[in-house]
Image (tube, rainbow, N blue to C red):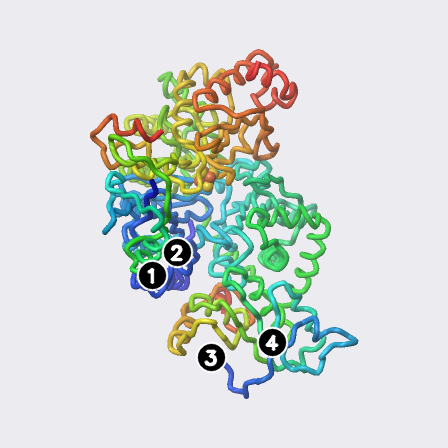
Amino acid sequence: MVDVLRYRTDEMVGDPGVTVDSFVDPVFGQTNASAVRLEPGDDARALLPYLDRLALVEVNFPAYGDGRGYSSARILREAGYTGELRAVGDVLIDQLSHMHRCGFDAFAPEHAITREAADKAIATWPEVYQRTVDGRQPIWALRHG
Amino acid sequence: MYKYDNYDQQMVDARVSEFRDQVARRIAGTLTEDQFKPLRLKNGLYLQLHAYMLRVAIPYGTLSGAQMRLLGDIADKYDRGYGHFTTRQNIQYNWIKLADTPDILADLAKVEMHAIQTSGNCIRNISSDQFAGAAADEIVDPRPYAELLRQWSSFHPEFDYLPRKFKIAVIASETDRAAMKLHDIGIRLRHDDAGAIVADFYVGGGMGRTPMIAPLIGDGIAIDHMVTYTEAALRVYNRHGRRDNKYKARIKILVHEIGADSYRSQVEAEFAHLQTLELEPPAAELARIQAMFVPPAFDTTAPDSVDRSDPDFAVWLDNNVHAHKQPGYALVTISLKPIGGIPGDASADQIRLMADLAQKHSFDELRVTHAQNIVLPHVKKADLYALWQMLEANGLGTPNLDLITDIIACPGLDYCSLANARSIPLAQKISQRFADQGRQQDLGELKLKISGCINACGHHHAGHIGVLGVDRKGVENYQLSLGGSEGADTSLGQITGPGFSEDGIVDAIEKATEVYLVKRENGERFVDTYRRVGMAPFKEAIYG
Amino acid sequence: MKILTGNDLKTGDVIWWTGYDWSRHVEDAVDVGSDADTILAREEATRRVNASYAIEAQKTADGVRPAHIKDRIRALGPTVRPDLTLKPTDPEIGNWVI
Ligand code: SF4
């Protein structure tokens, strides 16, 4: 069992995420599931009608170099998703700050990362240039009050 | 020129310490090379044929004298006394030690420079018109817009693991000096009918193994949505660009495969959505940046005439000096293509000399061109002769801009681990063959470009004459193409036929120029004649 | 013969496996027969070499010469800057590279 580094205070959802296909299928779908797992090729927007009943979305990174999950995460947060957004798989320490900026608030890396190292990684950037979904004010906003 | 404020400085400083930590972890063994590689690439550090190579960003090709001087000092302190200016308006050092790189980046940060995102599958250094801010034909200086995009793209959290590298160019004049349509995104700023500045987005151009000219995707995007539109264009690419095959992963393949219309409508949908999220920096931010790009304090009484009595000086004037929008001033291009030299290379001393000359004669400003030359953008006409004498005395006065010996050549197999064949020795041989100034002058504008492999860093597809190095059973072989061009008349070269040995291709190029001399009509350039008469007569002369 | 090459992790120098260590001179390279993978795995793990691989080479009167031009250029240095090669003072040295 991989340790989950969580940056939220609510109870952790124990259920394993079901696939997007099985979640949204109108006939055989498990639309009552509360956890879904997004693969890189899945369309995050397929989940938008169901966000209020989801407590956990796992976004899988089979290889760290496949960056589609960053867009998936932002799309969910931009649509108002407030449940847990967990990056799983080939999640490396040097990616944590960007993942966090895209809305991930939990990480289940294949190779364990200590909490201390993760905290430090997430704090890499003193300020940021872009507005994303992490609530930070971009530098341009700070410059112009 | 742009000046960092505390925020910008903090960001590059944060990057230096992040990379110092990553290098330490690699040397200690907690990072494997597989894990380290993407991290070092995002700081421009490659492992090349002989050593590590560091690529330093020169945003939109503009630098100050102090920055240029530091580039010379780095060449002495950490490398072997020279640097290589690239077709992407960057500089590369060929003999870097891994353990030194954090210190080099720290030195760079002191003069507001960095190597951020000069490699890797992310948004690369933004390029622009090398004559920006001085060209007579621009509607506005494009560099503040490029700076806005530089900041937006720096450490962009969503776009750090794109399917492939991503190159953006911004221009603001009718004449395209930045090969804008051969970029992943080329932005041309123009006036709309009401006189407002708008941005045309050309998306999906590129060279490499499948060269494509970018179609117009965003037509007249309001300037206060430029960043948001770029974000939308990138998100569609990040989500849908191919990741199954590295050779099909550039955005040009996506746009080509789904079609420009389908790509456009996806971008428009994403754009509509993103506009609700207030991602765009305010107009005040653009104004803040623009205030740093105000024209220098030109001497409005400077005489507009030049004494041409020295014939060698006159040749250089005619070839390397362009009209400036300010009377009494000129744009000077310093050729880094001496006859028989290595295209784009400059010694530490030459780099420092150019820094001094910029301080003395060009309001402390220089530009790097995608043709691997250096521009002094604001030189008083009255200073031109003295400047030329200094350049001449230091091997920098070659009067060959846009002539056949002004060859663009990538590092090729002498330095590059991806190469199939050497580019530099070929450039040197061609340069020597056509060394005679009268002959070069007679051939007129002739853009010759050489790449050592299909990655096309030497832009061979866009050469009036293009050469591509290939590996034929372990022996270097060269393919010749004709009729490529960049700029307003962008076109892709056509391959003449079977390839050549190193000497064979020099002969073939010479034959092609002879066909041109015979066939040309009034005022035609090589590429015009080729377009009019077609490949057949060239083929016949070359393969006979 | 099969020889091993790579780059020094810290300096980036091109290096060749001598049987017990790494040398900057291709002349010191030894035939590793079928042991390439074992040696490379061990040497990469101890970080004595980076980006290493095995190549074909021939033993000649003048020393070991890699079969492919790319590795011959790596063995010497850039052909366009003889002053920066391993043997800058020997005008004949480049003759076996091309
Ligand atoms: S074109 Fe090929 S050989 Fe030339 S620099 Fe690019 S990758 Fe290297």
Mark 3 closeness class: few <14, some 14–19, many ≥20 residues within 10 Å: few
- Measured in 3D between alpha carbons, the distance from the residue under mark 2 to the one under mark 4, in whole angstroms, is 31 Å
Residue B290 left/right relative to C7: right
Residue to which mark 1 is pinned: B26
Q: Residue furthest bottom?
A: A11
- Judged from the image, the secondary structure of the residue bearing numbered disc 3 is loop
Q: CA distance from mark 3 to mark 4?
A: 16 Å
Label 4 resides on the chain identified as A
Q: Is residue B411 left or right of residue B466?
A: left
* Residue B231 placement (x, y as % from top left): 59, 58
Pinpoint the chain carrying mark 2. B
Amino acid on which disc 3 is placed: Asp
Residue drawn at point x = 66 percent, y = 48 percent? B255
Please tell me which residue is depicted at 38% across the width and 57% down the height of the picture. Answer: B33
Residue under pointer 4: A57
Asked whether B236 or C54 is in front, the reply is C54
Q: Amino acid at mark 4?
A: Val
Is residue B357 visible in the rendered image? The answer is no
Q: Which residue is mark 3?
A: A3
Is residue B334 positioned above or below B10 on the image? above
Element type where label 2 sits in the image? helix
Q: Which mark is residue B40?
A: 2
Q: Are marks 1 and 2 in contact (CB under 8 Å)?
A: yes
